[in-house]
Structures are given as structure tokens and as C-alpha cells.
Image (cartoon, helix red, strand yellow):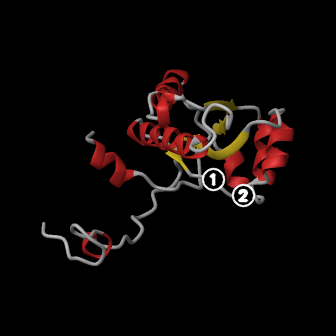
Amino acid sequence: MEVLEVVRKRRSIRRYRTEPVASEDLKKMLEAARLAPSAGNRQPWYFIVVRDAEIKRKLAEAAAHQMFIADADVIVVGVSDPRRSPRWHDRDLMIAMEHLILEATELGYGTCWIGAFNEDRVKEILEIPEEYRVVALTPVGVPDESPPPRPRRSLEEIVFQDKWGSKTKF
């Protein structure tokens, strides 16, 4: 699959089958995250792979009670270290998570970017030290739905040529 095809295919999945995520596939997703660019190549990220049902349930509750999260086979929690990259740690982690999400899509799995959560509660559940930041979570699993594409603004609305407001010439 080509990159643009993967990007077009990616959806926020909120229903999952009970089938497991293959360990080799999960490793590929994490490898994609590991290879992401970061400011100064500081790589300020860590990933916690959660498969334990009780921990997944607690994470779903901590994520604004979005209980569908616990239905996925895996929850990947993206954690950044501000000491490694004080200014860019969170953005770098977001890029790495998107790499993971796109690889998951390529492999036929569903994900859903989760940014609504109680960080202190997630840290408590996963025993994450205070100095680290929880930036994002994503469930990963075999999708049990196939949502249609969401509307997107046109390129003409969002891309300017040379200066703000100047129409593009494609």
C-alpha cells in the first residue's frame, strides 16, 4: 500500500473484534514509532503496551469513560520525557504515535487517537514516574466497523502560495 492510500484508509475505530493483534504486527507498529523523527534526534518517547483486561478497563475509565478503548486487544500508551527534549517532547511523541497508527492501518488494524484522559490517573494506573508526561493513548485491534471518510476541507481552502491568503496554483 502506498503512504497516501494508508492515510486515506485510516479511520477512528471505536468497535473491535475479540481477535488478537499478532505480536509480530505489534512489533512492526512499535518499530514504525521508534523510527519517527524527533527534534535533535532526542527520541523522548516510551510506549507502554497494555493487554491486561483490568488495566485496560481502568485506562478506559481514566479516558473520560470511553469504554470502547478496553475492547481492543491492545492499548498503546505514549509517554514522553520532557528532560530529553524540553520544548518538543510532546510533539515528537505525537509524530511517533502517528507512525504507529499508520503502520497499524497498513497491517489491517484499527486505532483511535485518544487525547482525552486524566493524566494523573493514567500515571497512577501504569505506575509512571512524575517527571514523565502521558501524551496520547490508542487502542489497537481488529476493527468491527468500517466508518465512511469524514469530510475534509479542500486544498484550496487551506493552502496558500507564497503568502497568507494568496491562492495556490496547482
Please identify the residue farthest to the left as the structure is shown: 170
> Are there few (<14), some (14-19), or many (20+) residues within 10 Å of tag 2?
some
Residue wearing tag 2: 66
Residue at x 26% of width, y 71% of height = 163
Mark 1 crowdedness (10 Å alpha carbons): few <14, some 14-19, many ≥20: some
Q: Is residue 5 above or below residue 74?
A: below
- Which residue is rendered at x = 44% and y = 28% of the image? 35
72 w.r.t. 65: above or below: above
Assign a secondary structure to mark 2: loop
Query: Which quarter of the rendering shows the N terminus?
Result: top left
Please name the residue that numbered disc 1 is placed on: 114
Extreme residue toward the top, this view: 24
Looking at the image, do the residues carrying marks 2 and 1 touch, with CB atoms under 8 Å apart?
Answer: yes
Q: Is residue 54 at least partly visible in the picture?
A: no
Comparing labels 2 and 1, the label whose residue is closer to the camera: 1
Q: Amino acid at mark 1?
A: Ile
* Front residue of this view, candidates 34 and 103: 34
Q: Position of residue 140 (x, y in %)?
A: 57, 41
Residue 131 falls in which quadrant of the image? top right
Whole-Å distance between the Cαs marked 2 and 1?
9 Å
Q: Earlier in the sequence, mark 2 or mark 1?
A: 2
Helix, strand or loop at mark 1: loop
Question: Looking at numbered disc 2 in the image, what kind of residue is underneath it?
Answer: Gln
